[in-house]
Amino acid sequence: MNYPAIVSPEGRQTVITFPDLPECQAIASVNDNFLKVAQDTLVNYLKTLLQKHEEPPHPSEKIKIRGTATALIVPLPDELARALEDRWATTAD
């Protein structure tokens, strides 16, 4: 399972946002591995939602990119993906 992210240069830093999770953002420097920063941030955010018994949104299949931003596909660890699928299955009933 993957969540899309938007990578936007902002001066000397890069902002990584998740269209499906507006409250989830990361700041990276030029030397950082954007995918690792994005994945660490996303995993921690989703785990927190699950611990609070909240239902995270499903990942979008398409996103809009504007200006100098680029898309980044952020994979989830299998264990977390299964936990999300279980949560969605129990709330779908």
Image (cartoon, helix red, strand yellow):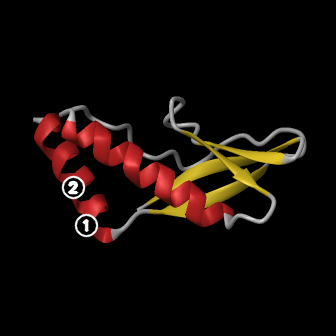
Question: Does the residue at mark 1 contact the one at mark 2 (Cβ under 8 Å)?
Answer: yes
Residue 90 in percent (x, y) is at 11, 42
Element at badge 2?
Answer: helix
Residue located beneath label 2 in the image: 83
Residue under the image location 81 percent in, 59 percent down: 30
Whether residue 68 sits left or right of residue 72 in the image: it is right
Q: Amino acid at mark 2?
A: Ala
Quadrant assignment, res 91: top left
Number of other residues with Cα within 10 Å of mark 2, as a class: few under 14, some 14 to 19, many 20 or more: some
Rounded to the nearest whole Å, what is the CA distance between mark 1 and mark 2? 6 Å
Residue under the image location 69 percent in, 46 percent down: 6
Residue under the image location 21 percent in, 55 percent down: 83
Q: Which mark is residue 79?
A: 1
Say which of 40 and 58 sits in front: 40
Residue 34 in percent (x, y) is at 67, 61
Element at badge 1?
Answer: helix
Q: Which mark is residue 39?
A: none
Is the residue 32 above or below the residue 21 in the image? below
Residue under the image location 89 percent in, 41 percent down: 11
Residue 78 in percent (x, y) is at 31, 70
Is the residue 86 above or below the residue 33 in the image? above
Q: Amino acid at mark 1?
A: Glu
Image quadrant occupied by the C terminus: top left
Residue 1 in percent (x, y) is at 41, 62
